[in-house]
Amino acid sequence: MQKFYKYIYWDENIPEKKRNQIKWRVKVSFRKMKPVYLVTLCEGPDQLEIYYSPILLQNFYRKNPRMIIGIAATYNGAIEIIRQITEECFQENHNCDLKYY
């Protein structure tokens, strides 16, 4: 079961009505869902990663869940979420340490 950031970032292309359903389907690894892109905290020295949601159905990711901080309908939407997070972090902390932010 995946973990979610309390104030998750959403792509503007995902309708407000479907957000809870998408979040639930990602959380329980529901196979019959429209794939989305997930922005997660990186386990290694990098800061953020983008995953295509079907990849998280693999056993490795079920045993080692990721912290999901953003959900996007497209890859470009995921890039936009990362840009938004980076801008907010820089404005608030004057650095780009996204894991700390």
Image (tube, rainbow, N blue to C red):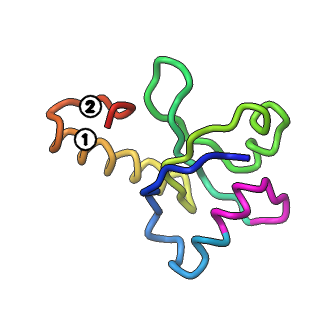
The residue that appears at 56% across and 58% down in the rendered structure is 74
The residue that appears at 39% across and 45% down in the rendered structure is 82
Span shown in magenta: 22-33
Name the residue furthest bottom. Answer: 17
| Residue highlighted by disc 1 | 89
Horizontal arrangement in the rendering, residue 56 relative to residue 39 (left or right): right
Q: Amino acid at mark 1?
A: Cys
Residue 8 lies, with reference to residue 63, above or below; the image says below
The image quadrant that residue 92 belongs to is top left
Residues tagged 2 and 1 counted as in contact (Cβ below 8 A): yes
Q: Secondary structure at mark 1?
A: helix
Q: Amino acid at mark 2?
A: Cys
| Residue highlighted by disc 2 | 96
The residue that appears at 61% across and 46% down in the rendered structure is 3
Residue 19: percent from left, percent from top = 57, 71
Residue 75: percent from left, percent from top = 54, 51
Horizontal arrangement in the rendering, residue 24 relative to residue 92 (left or right): right
Crowd around label 1: few <14 · some 14–19 · many ≥20 (10 Å)? some
The residue that appears at 56% across and 82% down in the rendered structure is 17
Identify the mark nearer the N-term, 2 or 1: 1
24 falls in the magenta region = yes
Crowd around label 2: few <14 · some 14–19 · many ≥20 (10 Å)? some
Residue 28: percent from left, percent from top = 77, 56
13 falls in the magenta region = no
**Res 5 label:** none
Residue 86: percent from left, percent from top = 30, 41
